[in-house]
Structure formats: structure tokens, C-alpha cells
Image (cartoon, helix red, strand yellow):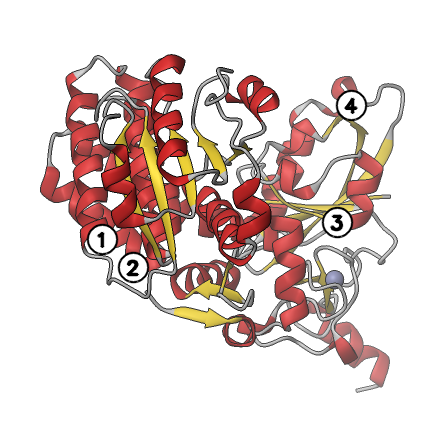
Amino acid sequence: MSSPDRRAMLRLVPSTAEDHCPSQWFCGHCGAPPPNNETPAPPARVCGECGLGLLLEARADAVPRPSDPFLIVDGSLSVCALSAEAERLLAVAETDVINRPVTELVTPADAEAAGPESLAAAIMWAARGEDEPRRVMVRPANVFGVRMPLRVGACGPPRAALLVLE
Amino acid sequence: MRYLKTSEAAALLNVSPNTLRAWERRFGFPRPQRSPGRHRLYTHGEIAALRDALLDGLSISSAVSRAREGLGADTNALVGALNAFDAGRADAALEGALALRSLDRAVQEVLLTALDEVARRHGTDSVQWAFAARWGNSWLRRAQRLVTPSVRAITVVLGDASRDDLDIDAAYIRALELLLARSGASVLGLSVRGVSNMSEALAAHRPDAVVIAGGALADDAVARWAYAVRLATGALPVAVYRRGSQRQRVRTTGAGLLPSTPGEAARHLMELASHSVSNPTTSRTTPPRLLADGA
Ligand SMILES: [Zn+2]
């Protein structure tokens, strides 16, 4: 069997770790990766860079760059973390919005086009572990006339949605 | 109650001491006490609660929030016991709180917070409040009797201007007395209603500072008492604790205003009294203007 044929055959096998997007760790506050991109031990997930966030894992194509504003939201749509950049962009302190509904910070901008529940649905899918990133348009809840794309992916542990403002 | 030094607490949480201090600034938690040498002392219960919350947390903020919630359960348990008129369960709830916190914080964050909650929910004319206030005051008096006598370098005379145990200030005043005693002060608590023969009491105790606590009794009664104290001891530093509209009064009299948190108030008062002990000429010759001059 020629090698192209073998590749074609292999592709028929259901997706495995080989074509699975690799994952990366990042700090939920400053976005920095752990030293050498190593997986942290469970009791040592505090970011060594800033000391103010916990290290979380997500698919490499969902992970924010350190300059990206992002939020971590759980399956009940409550805010669990707000990055330093998101604090600046949304002009709120993480400690003031923790456990608050995410819609107090960002609301769907395409209510007519995609349905108001698309943001909520994307978050709930991601928080359930559906790790294919989705994109929705949002606007900051306290600003009118500003729309921005939001990338929603899965992260954890524990399972949650990672919302990156692009 | 088990205390941890900064390095021990940091090791338990797997972070550096600097990170722990950064968390204190940003999240207000964990909140250490200070040792007599001003070093940070963390309660083991608070650090353990945070460590557990961090294990399956998504952020430091959410872990802090969960650790706080867990600690708040003691207050809810105490409120529940008081609302059920169950003194045994109330004692047990406070014992549970003391396993996780210092006495200072158990009194402030659990006992007084629970009493405030009962008063807010049912009103101070309710039978729930009557039960809760009586339980709280008796617990605080019992705790004060159990304080091991130390070398009492400082003596404070406290003029109690609360109405009775059902006065919402009363438990705060008992708490201040308890925490002063725990700080090593000898406290002579007197109702401001008793004025005659004051010199007999003060000759036995020789106070270093005077505190007037509570807002129920009228200014003229408090002034008579303060004047009697001044005649018996000469000028002493004077402080005011939980006396309604005290800000106005303090501006006009120059007395020290104590924070309403008993732990903080006890620390301020100890400093005031220590200053009086170490600088007897300066502080004792300053006339106490509190009400005694007819303010
Ligand atoms: Zn970080």
C-alpha cells in the first residue's frame, strides 16, 4: 500500500489525540503561560508570573495571548475570573464582578441575527466541555455602539467557558 | 486556635510570602492579625479553607469568595440557633467559629454579626432579640472571666453608658472589655450611673486611660461620671466608644474616637494607654476636655 493510501485509511478512524488540537496552560489573570509550558501540579496552580491568577488549560486555538482581554465563566453564566486586560477594557475590578451574571459585563450584539441565547448557548456548550471555539458578537454592557467579536472556548479545571474579546 | 507565620501559611498554599501579601492587598483575604512584634499571624482555618477552595477554583477571586462563604456558615449557624432559642447550639456554633478564627474575629465576625442580624430581622423589642442579647452578653462575660490574668501593666476604666443588656451597644461593650483583657489590660467596668465614692474605686485600680462606651445614657449623666473620674485621678487620656453622634461631641471635646469594631478599638485604646504610661507628664497634664468642662 502506498503511503498516501495509508493516510487516507487512517483518516477514516475517528478523531484521536493525533489530530486533536494541542492544549496549553495560561494564567487566568495575566494570560502568561507556566514556565516551559509545563503542566502544573494541582496544588501549585497559582501563576508564578503575577501571583494573582490560577493556571488553566485550554485548546491552543482558544488560549488568549497575554494582551487579550478575557473572562472565565461557569455553566451557570456567572463570572469566575476576569483578566487584568478585561478589567481595564470593561472598567471593572474582578473582585467586584465575581459570581455576577456575565450579561452584566457583555451582552449579545446580534440579538436579531443569531438569537439572544447564542451567547448563553455558546458559554454553556463550552462549560460542558465542547471545545471547538465559537464566535459571537457582543458589546460591553455599559457602552453603546461598540461591538466586538468574542471567542468562546472551553477551559479548566474545573470545566468552564473561556471568553476572549478579540 | 492554631496560628501560622507568613512563611508557614505561604508554604501551605504553595505560594511565596510576597504573593500572600499581594492577596491581602487585592482580595482582603486571608486577613492576618498582628503579633505583639507586628508580624503577620494567619489562622490555620482560614488558610486551610482557602487551600481547599484553590484546588478546584477558576481564579483566586472565586476561591476567596468560596472560602469566605464557608467561614460565613458559622454566622448562619449561630443566627439559626439564636432564632430557635437554643443556647446549647449557639454555644456550639461559636465553638466551631473559634476553631477557625482568632477570638477577636470570632467575636466580631460571628457573635456580633449574628446579634446584629437577629436585631435587624426581628427588632430589638422582639423575644428573639431578648434571648440573643442575653446569650451574647453572658457568653462574653464568661469568656472574660476565663482570660488568664497577665502582668497588668495597663489599667482602663470603662464608663458603661448603655441602657442594659438589651441595648444593642451592650454586647459591643462586653466585647471591648473582653478584648482589652485579652490584650493584657486590667479593665474596671463601671456603669456611669454610679458616681459617689469614685475615688475609692480608682485608688484601688489607678487607671491609665478612660473610655466612655455606649450611647443610651444622657450627656449630663456621662459628664457627671467623667468629672468624678477626673477629680479622683487627675487628667487622663479619654476615649469614646459607640456613643451616638460622638463625632460631633469629639470635635468639641478633643476625646479620642475609637473605631466601632471592638478589636480595633481595643488596639487603639491600648496604644493610648501605653502612651500615657510611657509619657506620664505630657499626657496626664493635658486636661481631659471630654464633657467634664461642661461641653
Ligand atoms: Zn499570571
Can you identify the residue that label 2 sits on? B99
| The N terminus of chain B lies in quadrant | bottom left
Q: Given the image, what chain letter belongs to the residue carrying mark 4? A: A
At label 3, counting other C-alpha atoms closer than 10 Å, the crowd grade (few under 14, some 14-19, many 20 or more) is many
Q: For this view, does A68 lie left or right of residue B43?
A: right
Can you identify the residue that label 1 sits on? B95
In-front residue for pair B131/B188:
B188
Residue B88 screen position, x and y as percent: 10, 43
Can you identify the residue that label 3 sits on? A83
Query: Residue B118, located in which quarter of the rendered image?
Result: top left
Q: For this view, does A22 lie left or right of residue B227?
A: right
Write the residue at 68% across / 43% down: A94
Write the residue at 45% across / 48% down: B68
Q: Is residue A54 among what the camera can see? A: no
Residue B110 screen position, x and y as percent: 33, 42
| A113, above or below A91, in the image | above
Q: Identify the amino acid type marked 1.
A: Glu
Can you identify the residue that label 4 sits on? A142
Write the residue at 53% across / 27% down: B289
Q: CA distance from mark 4 to mark 1?
A: 46 Å
Q: CA distance from mark 2 to mark 3?
A: 35 Å
